[in-house]
Image: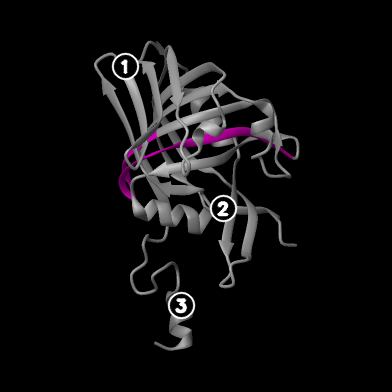
């Protein structure tokens, strides 16, 4: 294989059999369970990278079931997303994500910079309760619950929020000497959104300390609300907003 062939073929690792295919990446019947909670403002401020700014001490803990995603397959994800502002506009910063499928773990990290680690999240309905669980190895680190479809939410409002709210990531790729070769604030959109249903109900969230899955470092002080919705959407490719190495 010559140099020009490598340049044409190179997309992702490994060269001859990439861990994930080129996009676009479309998700069908993507199920979200999001619990919003108030946390310690000093601890939250300490994990938000400039030039993003904290709006208020709030975290969204997410459990996401993805049964049908092009290129990535069938998997579940969980993690913490922080409402922030950038250049005066409200957005969301993804702080931590844990999932059970390698292609979206590799693709999410390499393409966009999603802070993904392999773990064992689940999202299921148990009789009258929607339950999200996150295990890291044998240890339970998060349990969320909500009364199943107690009240319907406005699907148009949810869809508009998904379309209009910018999403931010801190993309880090190391050099061969261990220093950062890429360190960028990246944004990405959600496109072609169609919400099939949206609900809310009474909710609870429990977080447990773990050395390598430190979700409890942003402690739950007060539950503010919860949303459960199902949507089709396309995960758009990213844009560099700020380069930390320049």
Q: Name the residue under label 3.
A: 8
- Name the residue: 71% across, 57% down: 244
- Name the residue: 42% across, 13% down: 201
Q: Which mark is residue 43?
A: none
**Quick check: 207 left or right of 178?**
left
Q: Mark 1 points at which residue?
A: 129
Magenta region, mostly helix, strand or loop?
strand
Furthest-left residue in view? Answer: 127
Any magenta on residue 101? no
Quarter of the figure with residue 33: top left
Looking at the image, which is closer to me, 146 or 212? 212
Asked if residue 103 can be seen in this view, the reply is yes
- The quarter of the picture where the N terminus appears is bottom left
Separation of marks 1 and 3 at Cα, in angstroms: 50 Å
Tell me if mark 2 has few (under 14), some (14-19) or many (20+) residues whose alpha carbon lies within 10 angstroms of its own. Answer: some
Furthest-bottom residue in view? Answer: 2
- Name the residue: 43% across, 11% down: 202
Q: Name the residue under label 2.
A: 238
Quarter of the figure with residue 135: top left
Any magenta on residue 75? yes
Q: Give the range drawn in magenta.
A: 64-86
Sooner in the amino-acid sequence: mark 2 or mark 3:
3
Q: Position of residue 39 (x, y in %)?
A: 60, 24
Q: Position of residue 123 (x, y in %)?
A: 33, 30
Task: Determine the secondary structure under disc 1.
Answer: strand
Position above or below: 177 against 151: below
């Amino acid at each position: 294989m010559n140099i020009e062939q490598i340049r044409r073929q190179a997309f992702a690792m490994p060269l001859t059999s990439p861990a994930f295919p080129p996009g676009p990446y479309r998700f069908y019947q993507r199920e979200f369970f999001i619990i919003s909670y108030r946390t310690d403002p000093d601890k939250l401020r300490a994990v938000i990278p400039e030039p993003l700014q904290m709006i208020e001490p709030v975290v969204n803990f997410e459990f996401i079931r993805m049964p049908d995603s092009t290129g990535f397959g069938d998997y579940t994800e969980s993690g913490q997303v922080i409402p922030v502002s950038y250049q005066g506009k409200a957005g969301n910063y993804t702080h931590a994500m844990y999932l059970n499928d390698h292609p979206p773990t590799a693709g999410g990290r390499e393409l966009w910079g999603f802070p993904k680690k392999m773990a064992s999240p689940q999202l299921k309905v148990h009789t009258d309760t929607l339950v999200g669980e996150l295990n890291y190895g044998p240890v339970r680190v998060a349990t969320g619950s909500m009364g199943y479809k107690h009240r319907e939410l406005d699907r148009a409002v949810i869809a508009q929020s998904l379309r209009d709210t910018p999403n931010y990531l801190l993309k880090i790729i190391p050099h061969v000497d261990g220093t950062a070769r890429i360190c960028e604030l990246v944004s990405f959109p959600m496109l072609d959104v169609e919400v099939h249903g949206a609900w809310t109900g009474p909710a609870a969230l429990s977080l447990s300390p773990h050395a390598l899955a430190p979700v409890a470092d942003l402690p739950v002080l007060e539950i503010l609300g919860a949303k459960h919705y199902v949507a089709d959407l396309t995960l758009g490719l990213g844009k560099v907003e700020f380069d930390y190495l320049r």
